[in-house]
Amino acid sequence: MEPQRRGETVGLETRSGYQALVEAPFPEPRCLLGIRIADRSLTGIDYLFSQGGPLPPRTSLAALVVKQLQGYFADPGYRFHLPIQVCGTPFQRRVWAALREIPPGRTRTYGALAAALESSPRAVGNACRANPLPLVVPCHRVVSASGLGGYDGRTAGRNISIKRWLLDHEAV
């Protein structure tokens, strides 16, 4: 299945490409998390704004992903322990690895992360935008020097509401 662009509306015909759809506790509009799995690894989590309902897990790994997502929603300090497979450039994978080192309840600025990676804030932001595993690879913990910054390439609207909710959930 062609990866769904995060944050888009999904139709019923697209549901079959996911191994589970789980309800997220984010603010309106209603959001489902589409779980994608390949080769016994989690490969994607998509934000889906849909009229449809949850889809029970189709595999044991999908059930584990759903259980761990629910664990995170119940406890913001929860740490994910999942087999993941991410496709990206070597630089993107370095950024994503650095994101996983940011503890719950903490943030880093794009600039600080860029300095640690000997890069630029814009390049770090682009890698965050391309992150296929939001929540598990916590790109929401990266903020601008003067505010929230963006989320999934947007600086307003429902995506920023999700970022704000995630940071509030973690009491940042």
Image (cartoon, grey):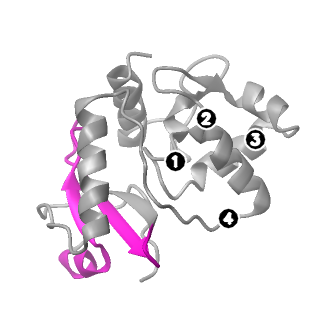
Marker disc for residue 122: 3
Above or below 79: residue 7: below
Residue bearing the label numbered 4: 88
Label 1–label 4 contact, CB within 8 A: no
Whether pointer 4 and pointer 3 mark residues with C-beta atoms closer than 8 Å, the reply is no
Report the disc number at residue 127.
none
* Mark earlier in primary sequence (2, 3): 2
Label 4, residues with CA under 10 Å away: few <14, some 14-19, many ≥20: some
Foreground label between 4 and 3: 4
Instruction: Give the residue number, with chain letter if any, for mark 2.
Output: 101
**Cα distance, mark 1 to mark 2?**
20 Å
Q: Residues within 10 Å of mark 3 (few under 14, many from 20)?
A: few
Residue at image coords 25%, 55%:
66
Three-letter code for the amino acid on which mark 4 is drawn: Gly
SS of the residue under disc 3: helix
- Type of amino acid at the residue the image marks with label 1: Asp
Question: Which quarter of the rendered picture does the N terminus lie within?
Answer: bottom left
- What amino acid does circle 2 point to? Glu
Q: Do the residues labelled 1 and 3 touch (CB within 8 Å)?
A: no
CA separation, marks 2 and 3? 20 Å
Q: Earlier in the sequence, mark 1 or mark 2?
A: 2
What count of labels does the image hold?
Answer: 4
Q: What element carries label 2?
A: loop
Image coordinates of residue 112 in percent, x first then y, are 75, 25
Instruction: Tell me where the magenta segment starts and ends, as one range.
Output: 12-41
User: Where's residue 119, x and y in %?
Assistant: 85, 40
- Does residue 105 appear to the left or right of 31 in the view shown? right
Q: Is mark 4 on a helix, strand or loop?
A: loop
Q: Can see residue 33?
A: no
Q: Nearer the viewer, mark 1 or mark 4?
A: 4
Residue 129: x and y, percent? 59, 50
Q: Which residue is drawn at 77% across and 60% down?
A: 90
